Image: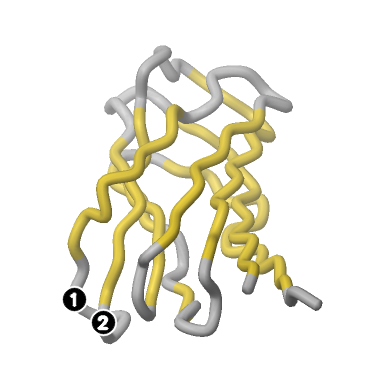
Amino acid sequence: MRQSYTAVVERNVEWRGDFAVEPYEAAWASEAIYFVRALAVANLPTGVMARVQVSPDGIHWCDEGTTLELPTVAAGLAFAKVTHFGGWLRLVGKLPDSATLKVIAYLVLKE
């Protein structure tokens, strides 16, 4: 039987400018999905992306290559699938100066 776990890594958090979700150790999992649910959106144009990053230690990070387009409407939902990620994962990005995005972000892990 496969095992799965869902971690809420951001809850009712407002992103402005540079953002990074809480790093999460996920070495036991073979696949992961980040979900970003928009609760409130202000001045966010389409095409703004978040990037998945990986780390061997939860301190030093590099881009994994997977991106997701952030939702531009309240109640919008976006996701990104990741495999072959090693020990630690996080989601990072940068919003335009006048934009804000209030979110709930989930990390779903499965083995």
* Residue 22 in the image, given as x and y percentages of width and height: 46, 68
Residue visible at 43% across and 59% down in the picture: 83
- The percent coordinates of residue 60 (x first, y second) are 18, 76
Label number found at residue 21: none
Image side of residue 14 versus residue 99, left or right = right
Picture quarter containing residue 73?
Answer: top right
The residue depicted at 37 percent of the width and 57 percent of the height is 20
Question: Where does label 2 land, which residue?
Answer: 56
**Which of 2 and 7 lies nearest the eye of the viewer?**
2
Q: In this view, does 64 lie to the left or right of 36?
A: left
Towards the viewer: 66 or 70: 66
Disc 2 crowd, CA 10 A, few/some/many (<14, 14-19, 20+)? some
Q: In which quarter of the image is the N terminus?
A: bottom right
* Tag 1: amino acid: His
Examine the rendered structure and indicate whether residue 108 appears above or below residue 37.
Answer: below
Tell me the crowding category of disc 1: few under 14, some 14 to 19, or many 20 or more residues within 10 angstroms, Cα based.
few
| Disc 1 element | loop
Q: List x then y, in percent, for residue 75.
A: 73, 27
Question: What is the three-letter code of the residue carrying label 2?
Answer: Pro
* Placement of 88 over or under 74, stated as above or below: below
Q: Which residue is drawn at 66% across and 25% down?
A: 76
Image quadrant containing the C terminus:
bottom right
- Residue at 44% across, 19% down: 44
Camera-nearest label, 2 or 1: 2
Name the residue carrying label 1.
Answer: 60
Position of 9 relative to 40 (above/below): below
Q: Position of residue 90 (x, y in %)?
A: 40, 62
Question: What secondary structure is marked by label 2?
Answer: loop
User: How many marks on residues?
Assistant: 2
Residue furthest to the right in view is: 1
Q: How far apart are marks 2 and 1 (CA)?
A: 7 Å
Q: Do the residues labelled 2 and 1 touch (CB within 8 Å)?
A: yes
